[in-house]
Amino acid sequence: MTIYDIAKEAGVAASTVSRVINNKPGIKAETRKKVQDLLKKYNYTPDAAARGLVMQSTKLVGILIVDIRVTHHINSAFLIEKELTARGYCCITMSTGPEDEKKAMYIRILEQRRVEGVILMGSMFMTDKVKESIQNHLPKVPVVMVNGYLDLPNVSGIIVDEDHGIEQCVDLLFRKNKRKIAFALDSVSPSNYKKQEGYCCGMRKNKAPKEDLWLYELEESSVKGGYDITQKIIREHPDVEGIIYSIDLVAVGGIRAAYDMGYSVPDRLGMIGVDNSIYGEICMPKLTSLDNRLQALSESAASILREGLEGKIQNKKMMLFSEVIEREST
């Protein structure tokens, strides 16, 4: 059903139907009602792209995620999209992969789609290639980076103090008399570098010898990845007393691995994740986790982008503070 079909059945010009759709004045009440009834009858929805060409507005927002399987990022994107959709915007969510060339390619795609705003999910967009691509292709479009920052006039960033948060996790384990602590990271990213710094700082603060700083990098960010890395940690350091994981999902696999290898949690081995996600709530025992403020992060990102979409493009940097949520695994 097209605008011309509606016009033909109503016995009016297509321009009249268009004026009714766009709530323009100058239409008789009887004619307006007749057209509105037909629009409702046929569940007619205007072509957003066509309207964008006329109105010089697409109402499109691009959301880029490096890996759409990362629960924390996709949950944040969902909350942001929900907020923006309620205000009449349509969000395009795309998974770029970790390669800088692909990230730059997706930024060019957003330019071609004529997006009016962009959300970048995660610190892995903090690269020179991404910065250059935004400068070349989206220099006047408001961009908000979640848990990261780029020094550009149209880019704002919201950062969580995960380094200090991980340091608090180390402190908690030491208070539980667990001094032999390993740290398992799921990927190489600026965010995880900060977490690593927090771990090392916490261990040094608690007088751990340098040889007791056990850093491990996961092969995959999954339950299996957590299971495999935990088995490796226990085999290489059977005296381990605590493990911190960079995301909750991985920690769930770690709890199972510890159980299979005869290490009770938390009596023999304390475990902490990051994200304060649903995974920590449903596993047994329930997982102690660093809450990196998903709700506040998402609300702030949507609010800053909304200001940009309303014409207040700015270069803003915001810090949120994380908190350790203690449960049964410590």
Image (cartoon, grey):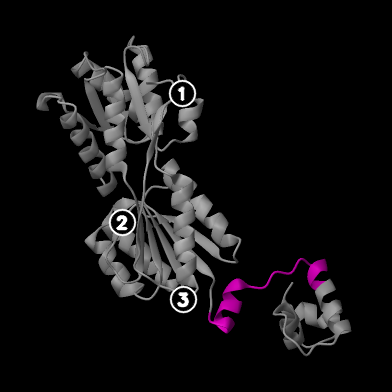
Most frequent secondary structure within the magenta stretch: helix
Give left or right: position of 201 versus 25: left
Kind of residue at disc 2: Phe
Q: Quadrant of the N terminus?
A: bottom right
* Badge 2 element: helix
Of the numbered discs 3 and 1, the one sitting upstream in the chain is: 1
Pointer 3 residue = 311
Pointer 1 residue = 286
Q: Magenta residues?
A: 38-56
Residue 12 visible somewhere in the drawing: yes
Give left or right: position of 126 versus 247: left
Q: Which residue of the protein is positioned furthest toward the top in this rendering?
A: 262
Vertical side of 241 occupied by 110: above or below: below
Q: Who's the residue at 45% across and 68% down the image? A: 117
Contact between labelled residues 2 and 3, with CB atoms less than 8 Å apart: no
Of the numbered discs 1 and 2, the one sitting upstream in the chain is: 2
Residue 125: which disc? 2
Of 93 and 207, which appears nearest the observer? 207
In the rendered image, residue 26, in percent from the top left (x then y), is placed at 78, 90
* Badge 3 element: loop
In the rendered image, residue 197, in percent from the top left (x then y), is placed at 20, 40
Vertical side of 205 occupied by 257: above or below: above
Give left or right: position of 305 versus 1: left
